[in-house]
Image (cartoon, helix red, strand yellow):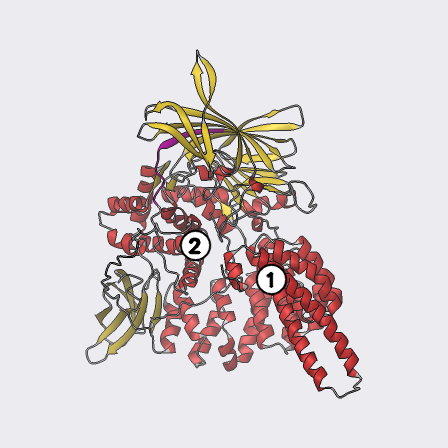
Amino acid sequence: MFKKLVYIIVLTVFFISCKSNEPITLPEHVIEMDDPFKTPSRPIYNASNTKEFDLIHTKLAVRFNWEKAHMYGKAEITLVPHFYTQNQLVLDARGMDLNKVQLMSIKDSLPSLTDLKYTYKDDKITIALTSPYTKEDTIKVFIDYTSKPNELAEGGSAAIKSDKGLYFINEKGEDQNKPMQIWTQGETQSNSAWFPTIDSPNQKSTEEIAITVNEKYKTLSNGVLSHSEENGDGTRTDFWEQNMKHAPYLFMMTIGEFEIYKDTWRDIEVNYYVEKEYAPYAKDMFGLTPEMLEFFSNKLGVDYPWQKYSQVIVRDYVSGAMENTSAVIFGEFTHQTKRDMIDGSSGEDVISHELFHHWFGDLVTCESWSNLPLNESFATYGEFLWREHKYGDDKAAQGLQSDLNSYLQEVSKGNYKDMVRFDFKSREDMFDRHTYQKGGRILHMLRNYIGDEAFFASLKLYLETNQYTDVEMHQLRLACEKITGEDLNWFFNQWFYAKGHPELNINYSYSDSAKTQTVTVEQMQKLNIAPLYYLPVNIDIYLDGKVKTHKVVIDKLTNEFTFDAASKPDLVNFDSDKMLLCEKVDNHTTMEEWAFMYNNAPRYMDRYEAIQKLSKSEETIATKTMITALGDTYPYLKRVTIRRIKKAVKNNEEKIKNKLLALAKNDSDSKVRGDALSALSIHFKDDEAVKKALVDGAAEESYYVIASALEGLSATNYEDAMKFAKSFETEKNSDIQSSISNIYATHGGKAQNAYFTEKIKNTEGFGRYSLVSNYGKYLKNQDNETVKSALPILKDVALNEDTWWIRLTGINAIADLDEMYANRTKIAEKELKELKAGDSKELELRNAITKDKAINVQLTSIMDEIKAAEKNPRLRKMIGLTD
């Protein structure tokens, strides 16, 4: 699964500065005396589900009552006892009406159904079997049931915001701007809301599903569509079959009015299901899929193992995307037009992530959610592999650095966890930046350590040995050890079975008398949190136009490495492969060293780290190198430089202005052009050439450039900003909407209220966040009449928006207005007291206070309603509630 999470909600790129100046605190050895009054308890241990039965085959027939949001199902479930003889069968089934539970058998060569006794409690069907079943016996159970997902008590998490399993979208057709759809979401254990099963990742079965729908709808499920039957009553039944085993959480179905773009890879169907509006762009959005299938198959040495590959975009999806076997679901963020894609694909990383899951997660599945990194760390690394293959080392390394930053954000407040952990409070807790981003980085270190050939040979062995089964982390280690011949417990123990990461302080000294270069590396992490690491790394020494690589191992609190050097090196480059998952302070003492690194070291991270350091200096060599970096060969590093150009501007305004103007006009990358416009509007806002460049930018095809130009005009010439904003009001693009709403929040009057109300009503997803946020800012500058008209809109967002972080924008807007009116009333009342008797302003002030108080009371009342209604623990804490 791909988590398209918003971590609130500003996307930032930051350098991994170190906390390494903290003193090391060694763990204390404390002997605790037993408390005779304290009842001992074992620590939490979430074991893999015990296998009493093994699923063999699941056959479903389903139809729907849209008006009630019910699904009528018939399930035939085939199982065998795993080992021990069994007298009862327990199935997961959430919130269902059970009509029949029967044993299917053959009597006198004819099918026979026998009613079975059962109890249904706590979402479990416990079935009494008619006789003991041994591991040699097969049992087939028939269940007739009704699924009622909208009547379930709903849970969820930050990664997967709902666990209803089955979703009816616009089921009554009341929203004219939204299609009617049905789709499912099974991970972690939610598919048992729409069919009885053993809902556990260590179960696998083959599957058939017959889906009866109105003839206007298309259906999608796992496997292949074997045939369809017209029923003569305006409905059609589609029969889907998957003849290879997969886990119950990967079962899926989707129903809707989709257009299907048909593609192929080798002899396998590759189809893209999209809404009619986006049908012309289906190939643009998903067209790299066949190339990805070929690349991953060749890279892993294991061909894509499933019967087809389809991808579908649905509305109101509860996560980013989901790797349902051979039928991946994506959220609507994936929808793009050709014009949207000028600024890059919103879905390519996600597409590669979900596809790589079809080896890691679908073919070989984690046996328990504690071992989820075997699914998600690999899928995250699949994104890296695709970037590396398709676009080269720089883009791949950019992704790795983003992953590291994301993980470090998560642990910045002490939220350290083992990668494989059995003590989670909820299985949903496993879907975090340890499991995804840190795990991908660990796999990259493993690849770097054992080498490419051994790494991919190990993955091939792991996949072939464990295909169609469930595994734990040790099986990956054993595959790597089988190939390399090396005991790798040290690597897996410190990275997968321990928490934290290295925090390194690196110092350099050259002895002219001894002709030696010394590198001192201190491990500064707190050893009561993280281990003392064993870190094989390379150190490159640049001297006299040559580079010499030294392999070293860091394995102590302080390691000192000394190398012969005839003169002081131009650069000593620690971790020259730039592969360590760590925080570090790299204490090069001169800007010349950092400039040399930018100009001579070969990797993305060399240049990135150098730009970070050089941007903080006003030395001439730093300015010169920053100007050079504005022309970096990789677009993202140009953008990093542009955003950090402030100090260099002080030293060479004219040259940098001209460089930025040239980038804004001519660079091939639209985001470089947009960022150049933003920088120009910040550093040279009164320059006429800059104003012209901003106006020209507003006429571009790229939405990103237009949005940047609008934001720049807002700072330099608000009349032009307002004029251009008006001309773009009908655009759906979220970048444009965000810029327009920001301009209106800053400069808008009463006339712009209609823009906010219409867009908030008709916009969904991330774009809605910026609209509501800017609406709150806009209202603080408007009259009472406009504010009063807006309160029902903000209240609706704060109380009824499904996505918690969008609800937060509504809550924040109401809270800010509440505070503003309270302060305004206090100031007016103070002014009133200071007036002399008979002052002509008295009546005006009293009227203003009365009106402001009325709105203040209304706002306070809404906040009270919000506090009473809000269930999300994070939001409750934010608004001052304690449970």
**Residue stretch rendered in magenta on the structure:** 47-59
Label 1: how many residues lie within 10 Å, few (<14), some (14-19) or many (20+)?
A: many
The front one of 53 and 391 is 53
Q: Farthest residue toward the top?
A: 108
Q: Residue at x 32, y 24 (%)?
A: 136
Which element carries disc 2, helix, strand or loop?
loop
| Mark 2 residue type | Asp
Q: Farthest residue toward the bottom?
A: 836
Q: Is residue 485 left or right of 327 when viewed as pictured? A: left
Quarter holding residue 562 = bottom left
Q: Residue at x 49, y 78 (%)?
A: 647
Label 2: how many residues lie within 10 Å, few (<14), some (14-19) or many (20+)?
A: some
The front one of 252 and 393 is 252
Question: In the rendering, which numbered label is found on residue 432?
Answer: 2
Residue 713 lies, in percent from the top left, at 65, 71
Question: In the rendering, which numbered label is found on residue 811?
Answer: 1
| Number of the front mark, 1 or 2 | 1
| Mark 1 residue type | Ile
- Observer able to see residue 188: yes
Residue 54 on the magenta span: yes
Residue 422 lies, in percent from the top left, at 34, 49
Which element carries disc 1, helix, strand or loop?
helix
> Relative to 687, does residue 264 appear above or below in the rendering?
above
Residue 3 on the magenta span: no
Q: Is residue 168 left or right of 45 when viewed as pictured? A: right
Quarter holding residue 744 = bottom right
Q: Is residue 767 left or right of 194 when viewed as pictured? A: right
Q: Is residue 485 left or right of 162 when viewed as pictured? A: left
Q: Farthest residue toward the left?
A: 514
Quarter holding residue 286 = top right
Residue 527 lies, in percent from the top left, at 28, 64
